[in-house]
Amino acid sequence: MSNYNVYQSSNVPIKAWTQGVQFESKAMEQAKNIASLPFIHKHVAIMPDVHYGIGATVGSVIPTIDAIIPAAVGVDIGCGMIAQKLKFTANQLPNNLADLRNKIESAIPVGSAGWNDIGFPRSILYAWTNYLYPEFSSICKKYPQFEKANHVNHLASLGGGNHFIEICLDENDNVWVVLHSGSRGIGNLIGRTFIEKAREDMRKWHINLPDIDLAYIPEGTDHFNDYVQAMNWAQNFAGNNRILMMDIICSILFSEFNCTSDETTVINCHHNYVQMENHFGRNVWLTRKGAVRAREGDLGIIPGSMGARSYIVRGKGNPDSFNSCSHGAGRVMSRGEAKKKFDINDHLAATIGVECRKDIGVIDETPGAYKDIDAVMEAQKDLVEIVHTLKQVLCIKG
């Protein structure tokens, strides 16, 4: 029995795994706009963490034929999660985690900071020089503005907003490090550059869209190959960004607690990206805008919020979802609404037992601003199975 609802658009249907969770009317209209585009393949899949976004709905999976929508991919290209299990248990952690939090915050730039503020570790320069810069320099020959952006100085930095570093405990009290970040300043510039080029082409070709943020770049046109190359590079940057931060955090934990990593359990997955995949007999550009790949056997990470559980999951390979699942709990209100609705006392109550920021600056990220993660998991039980349940004891926000 299917676990999704079906909604109609003027072109293809929408299959939404939203039973028991909120699917706001603005997000519904946005999903219908996407599904109305003539190059959508079969249907649009909506995940249970769905909420209104820019251009495309957050929590959507969009299969396109011979075209990509840059704003659907977004400006944090390759944003995603990494998780690492340690050979280390809860009873080895100190009762007060404030010192550990300070050490991690001192070792990794957070918020808008980058390495130009605190110096470059050798490992970052090595990764940049050997793995990332050669192709980047090729891209910059055509787009020299990228060379002047934040790039190497943002490699192995967290960023702000909903990006985080967490120390978590699983159901057996094993310690995990979980991290959420993306392609930082350079991904933002690449995204904005090609979003604007797509808009320019829509105006040049007199193509009317229900939303200008659905401007697309067709295969065979001037910017398509450039966008695919730059986008793939930014996704690679984002994956390396997470790996380098994980290495720094684990080195701190190894030094502090004489522990080691469990090399059999490392998960690194994008949830804002596009790649070529085959679905329903056709090669398509599949954009996951706030969604994780969940082929049969794939391991993924679905975080809750600062005060809720997170999950390590295994994909079931559901073809109707294009082998996808949610990327988190999903916002239930905007950042502005959260700041109006919650105060510092609400935030303190919601984060009891978590070593984290307890100030007014993170009210927009307080747990009440997000959907109930358990309801989100119930809505997608035909997409993934739960492998581990994690509860954070330390959370660092930018």
Image: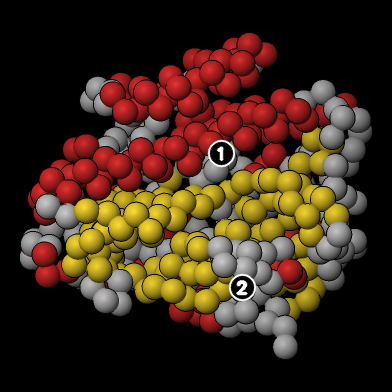
The tag earlier along the polypeptide, 2 or 1, is 1
* 65 is higher (above) or lower (below) than 196: below
Find disc 1 in the rendering and name its residue.
Answer: 235
Q: Position of residue 99 (x, y in %)?
A: 10, 50
* Percent position of residue 8, x then y: 84, 71
Q: Which residue is located at x 58 percent, y 31 percent?
A: 233
Q: Quadrant of the C terminus?
A: top left
- The location of residue 106, given as percent across then percent down, is 19, 38
Which of these two is toward me, 203 or 291? Answer: 291
Q: Secondary structure at mark 2?
A: loop
Quarter of the picture holding the N terminus: bottom right
Could you tell me the amino acid type at mark 2? Lys
* Crowding at mark 1 (Cα within 10 Å: few <14, some 14-19, many 20+): many
Q: Quadrant of residue 323?
A: bottom right
Q: Is residue 398 visible?
A: no
Residue matched to label 2: 316
Instruction: Mark 2 vs mark 1: give the one in front.
Output: 2
Q: Vertically, is 301 above or below 116?
A: below
Q: Residue 238: x and y, percent?
A: 49, 39
